Each structure stands twice: as C-alpha cells, then as structure tokens.
Amino acid sequence: EDLDVKEEESEFAMRNFPAAVYEEVPPYPEGEDGSGSGDVGNTHLLPLRAPGPRLGENMEAYVLRPAMRGHTVQCRISRDKRGVDKGMFPFYYLYLEAADGRKHFLLAGRKRKRSKTSNYLISLDPTDLSRDGDNFVGKVRSNILGTKFTIFDNGINPDRKNFFPETAQIREELGAVCYETNVLGFRGPRKMTVIIPGFDTQNRRIRVQPQNEQESLLNRLQRGANQGLILLQNKPPSWSDESGAYVLNFHGRVTRASVKNFQIVHPDDSEYLVLQFGRVAPDSFTMDFRFPLCPLQAFAICLSSFD
C-alpha cells in the first residue's frame, strides 16, 4: 500500500520517532556546491551535471547507456494519480532536468493491472504504455512478497521463446533490488541492496540473459556467485542532535521528509553516490544518478521503491 498521504499527514509525529524518516540536512553554502569532475575517489564533491540526449539520438540506446563518468544526471519523477484507476495504478513520468531549467521527457512507467505480483511497465512514449507497443523498453517485476524486484529490458521470456521467431532476442536482466525490513518495522527506512551487471574489458555492460531461474541475478546473489556483478547498497542515515532524527545529505535536492527517500552508494566508497531519490512535493520526486547506472536502471529502482 502507498503510504504517501499518511506520511504527509504525520510528518511531525515522524520527526519525533528517530529512524522513521530520512530528512534533508542543509545544502552546501552558496558558492560551495562542490561542482567538479567527480568519480570514485572524489566523493565529497558533487560532480558536473551530465548533458542530455542529442537531437535525433536513438532514445532506446540513450536510456540503456550508463551515465558519463564524473557527471551526475539530474532528473525528476512526476506521479499522476488522477482518473478512475490511477489512484491504485498511477502513471510515473521521468524527466531530465537540463541546465537551462527545462525538462526533457525520458521514460514513463505504470503499474500493470491483473498481475499476480507488482509489475511496472516502462515505455519511451508517455502516451503508449502497452506491453505490445513499439515503445516498450523494459519492466520491473517483484516476487510474491514484494521484497525482491528484477529489472528486465524488452526481450522475450526464455520460457516463451518457442512462440517467437528464432531471431527474437532473449531478455536481459539489467538489475535486481532486494528490500529488508528495518528492525523498527514499517515505520523505519528499509535496507536496500542493488545488483547490476558489471562491465567487460571493452567497458561494455556484461549481458545477463538467464535461461532459467538458477541463472538469475537474484539466485546468483543468494549463491554468492557475484563474479561480473556490481553490488550497491543504501547509505544509512546519521543521527542529528539538532533535528532529533536520522538524516542524509541530499545537497539541497530533497525538501520533504519521507521514509521513501534513499541514497545508493558504491561498495568501494560509501561517499560515492550512485543514486539518490527523494520527495519535493506530494507527487514530485528528484532522481539523480551517476555511473555505472543508466537511466532505465535508475528509474526502475525508484519505481520499485513506490511499492
């Protein structure tokens, strides 16, 4: 169930219940925003903003390409709950925030109806969110408990390959997200583990195309077969005596307290922010990411957090 409305109504109460909320801490002083070329090893500074897609660029290729090293891609997610079904099955729209202040549409997502588990479809077209449409680019599917999510591209399910031409591409797993309940229960922020394919010597993403469940990213994680994979984790908040709560530094990009606000960090450096997500209005969220994530992976991880 979406607890957004309850969060807004009880924010004051949550402030007095430490670990129940990720708050924002003050941003950098003016002129000290840390802008610079950053990557792992230059972690306390905010890196340069990444440029958007070029005019006429293949958008499917763009959303699958990892962010430029040393740059941050700043985005915003808008949630649309209007309409008969959108209260239960909202639409989500991802926009790139350009340096000139304009927003450029990148991806749309919606929770699929009549699905046994949480299943989000992702499209390149905000008006075409059909599984069979030409703009279908990927999906996120959860397990029965809603604690583990797998991110797929638009390839076919290997179990159904006999129903497709031999030239049809078997789907790739682009990532997986595992949630663990906080010791405080649902009131506290969840622990997140993110698994994505690594890169080969040519700096290309390693293809993970399981033919069965045993070859899946989640199964490999469970077996400890992590070769060729990148494991990421959420950054735990630190205690602030001043605000009387646990806080994370979102560098001015998040303005509302929420248990859904999170930061994902690189395993080699807990200060290297790979992805951060947080609320700025009841139905508006910022999503900023860096290498090694691509736009589709980052958006899919955030969609999983809405469950």
Image (cartoon, rainbow, N blue to C red):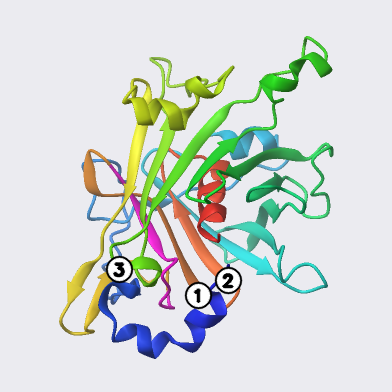
Residue 251 coordinates in the image, percent (x, y): 33, 67
Above or below for 233 versus 13 = above
Mark sitting earlier along the chain (3/1)? 3
Numbered disc 3: secondary structure: loop
The residue shown at (22%, 38%) is: 268
Q: Quadrant of residue 224?
A: top left
- The residue indicated by pointer 1 is 280
Q: Nearer the viewer, residue 263 or 56?
A: 263
Q: Amino acid at mark 2?
A: Ser
Above or below for 199 versus 149 = above
Q: Is residue 227 magenta?
A: no
- The residue indicated by pointer 3 is 184
- The residue indicated by pointer 2 is 284
Q: Nearer the viewer, residue 36 or 118?
A: 118
Question: Could you tell whether 270 is left or right of 72 in the image?
Answer: left
The residue shown at (81%, 73%) is: 83
- Magenta segment, which residues? 255-266
Mark sitting earlier along the chain (2/3)? 3
Above or below for 199 versus 37 = above
Mark-to-mark CA distance, 2 and 3: 27 Å
CA neighbours of label 3 inside 10 A, class few (<14), some (14 to 19), many (20+): few
Q: Nearer the viewer, residue 104 or 92?
A: 92
Cβ atoms under marks 2 and 1 closer than 8 Å: yes
Residue 219 coordinates in the image, percent (x, y): 44, 28
Q: Amino acid at mark 3?
A: Leu
CA neighbours of label 2 inside 10 A, class few (<14), some (14 to 19), many (20+): some
Numbered disc 1: secondary structure: strand
Mark-to-mark CA distance, 2 and 1: 6 Å
Mark-to-mark CA distance, 3 and 1: 25 Å
The residue shown at (41%, 70%) is: 259
The residue shown at (25%, 73%) is: 246
Question: Could you tell whether 30 is left or right of 201 in the image?
Answer: left
